[in-house]
Image (cartoon, rainbow, N blue to C red):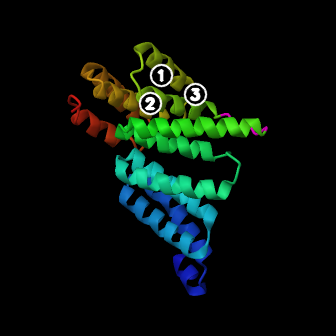
Amino acid sequence: IFVLCAQYGDRFHEAGSYNNRVFAWLPSGNIQKVREDCERTLQLARENGFAILELRVLHNLTEVTYLTGDLAMAAKWSRKNVELFDRLSGESVTGLLTELVLQARVFAALGDDEHAREVLADIRHRAAEAKARGENADLVPSVQVLFDLVELASRQATDEEWAALLARAEKDSVQEEPIEVWAIRGLAAQRGGRLDVARQALEKAKLLAQSIPNLLGPQVERWLAELRPAA
């Protein structure tokens, strides 16, 4: 397909093919190839004005770099993702709020509580304005769990609050999100000086990661290996 696209100058299908090949690399865990194909897709999308494809790739790059632990790059891609989504969506918040939650998740993993809380406040503000216009701005249950995850991680939440969120995650979260909830709970406990709680939470995240295909498992193991009192 790449030869044919080059022969006929078909940049649209070339970009789509690179984007599709990402999903062939994911099961093997070849993250370098995933990132290379995403970045090539992004280049073609920008050069040829494929804005919707650019949005999809920016989301994918944010999520892949986040889940694999390249948090500085995840923050960079998330900023670009939110900026473009905001320009293209106008007043509508459909989809944008979920991308903002993703950005907040990156800040939570970084331990950047100030920026995490700023994003959560932005989400609340945009949702309130949308509801005032009669637009449905409710987050789906799985995304609401992630929103609340960031909210708890960005302050000194109680054990009871964490237990309630973890119970909701067991019911509402999808794919590898329960791994993330336990992992961020562990990081928050570490930053609060509770290393026993942190280890237990990260061990639970590791156990969950061993039960399903996911990208986050190796990063969870690195967090466990690096577990020490917060500076």
Indicate whether residue 95 is drawn in magenta. no
Relative horizontal placement of residue 143, taking residue 94 as reference (left or right): left
The residue under the point 36% across, 25% down is: 204
Disc 1 from disc 3: Cα separation: 10 Å
The amino acid marked with disc number 3 is Asp
Q: Which segment is the magenta one?
A: 134-138
Q: In the rendered image, which residue does mark 3 sit on?
A: 172
Residue 100 locus on image (x, y percent): 54, 44
Q: CA distance from mark 2 to mark 3?
A: 12 Å
Residue 176 appears in the figure? no
Indicate which disc residue 84 carries: none
Q: Is residue 15 above or below residue 62?
A: below
Q: Earlier in the sequence, mark 1 or mark 2?
A: 1
Q: Amino acid at mark 1?
A: Leu
Residue to which mark 1 is pinned: 166
Q: Is residue 29 left or right of residue 85?
A: left
- Point out the image quarter for the N terminus: bottom right
- Distance from disc 1 to disc 2, alpha carbons, whole Å, reads 7 Å
Relative image position of residue 99 (x, y in whole percent) = 56, 46
The image position of residue 197, as x and y in percent, is 31, 20
Q: Residue at x 54, y 83 (%)?
A: 6
Outermost right residue: 134
Label 2 is placed on what type of residue? Val
Image coords of residue 26 (percent x, y): 44, 53
User: Crowdedness of circle 1 by 10 Å Cα count: few (<14), some, many (20+)?
Assistant: some
From the viewer's perspective, tell me whether residue 216 is left or right of residue 49.
Answer: left
Work out whether mark 2 precedes mark 3 in sequence or the reverse, and give the earlier one. Answer: 3
- Secondary structure mostly seen in the magenta stretch: loop
Mark 2 lies on residue: 181
